[in-house]
Image (cartoon, rainbow, N blue to C red):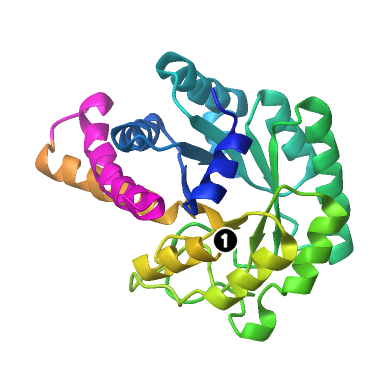
Amino acid sequence: MKTLRQVIQEAEKRKVAIGHFNISDLAALKAIFESARELSVPIIIGTSEGEREFIGVRQAAALVRSLREEYDYPIYLNADHTYSFEKVKEAIDAGYDAVIFDGTELSLNDNVAITKKCVAYARKVNPEIVVEAELGFIGKSSKVLDKIPEGVKLGEEFLTKPDEAAKFIQETEADMLAPAVGNIHGMLSGGHDPALNIKRIKEIREAAGVPLVLHGGSGNSPDDFVEAIKAGVRIVHINTEIRVAWRRGLENALKNNPKEVAPYKILPFAAEEIKKVVMEKLKLFSGI
């Protein structure tokens, strides 16, 4: 089985992106995995700190590993948005394929220092673990928003700068970088997020020398995805749209089956709605 690092390298050569979708339950995992298998593309499952607390850190790792082993399929697990070295260590020790240290609310010096510590620990445990770092604040919550998240500024002067990205990667030796390029966490209630700064994505990719990750992909336009991938994005994160689809499916199931109480009969409706979102995104990201 190829490692996630190898899969990312292949995506880089082919100029495509790998879909990264977060889960909170088995319904979402089932839908995402089935979508990837139908299209024969690799997939990354993400669990944030909150999602890991709900599912269980080792339990999430066991679930993904069981699918990989049983089906001999390139499905990987990422510790999404992790805010301390201790939580990064916990995910690495549990067998995650990738970890993200999010130090965007720290000082630059602290972000660099803790990212370096995370990289060093991952290399010590397993050199194949992919470590992603973040530079530039885009908000924190994966939810439907009425306005741009507090603290997020989308003017060009506030986006991640190419020279800063290059220095950050040089100092931390992180494998991938998630920059602020006009993207936001969550999704605006109108369904359309601000346009991405494709020019800045290309400049950061060239300066930093590592593949980029686009966070907050929910709500971005298909054209923006295509151009961002051409510019150097190799992983795209989708979470809010998954949550919205899960709720839509659940509400429909309960409305149409008001007396049903068996979760295994209700949750497939949520899975079907999630699958629609994932299939659409994976086709777009993979150029299918």
Q: Does the magenta stretch include residue 91?
A: no
* Quadrant assignment, res 137: bottom right
Q: How crowded is mark 1: few (under 14 residues within 10 Å), some or many (20 or more)?
A: many
Per the image, the residue denoted by label 1 is 232
Q: What x and y, as percent, mark residue 250?
A: 25, 43
Q: How many marks?
A: 1
145, above or below 69, in the image? below
Magenta region, mostly helix, strand or loop?
helix
As drawn, is 153 to the left or to the right of 267? Answer: right
Tell me the kind of residue under disc 1.
Gly
**Which segment did they paint magenta?**
259-288
As drawn, is 160 to the left or to the right of 219? Answer: right
Residue drawn 62% across and 32% down?
97
> Between residues 254 and 17, which one lies in front from this camera angle?
17
Residue drawn 83% across and 52% down?
172
Residue drawn 68% across and 32% down?
91
Q: Does the magenta stretch include residue 283?
A: yes
Q: What x and y, as percent, mark residue 125?
A: 79, 26
Q: Is mark 1 on a helix, strand or loop?
A: loop
Q: What x and y, as percent, mark residue 236?
A: 49, 54
As drawn, is 125 to the left or to the right of 36? Answer: right
Q: What x and y, as percent, mark residue 271?
A: 28, 37
As drawn, is 283 to the left or to the right of 15? Answer: left
> Between residues 102 and 203, which one lies in front from this camera angle?
203
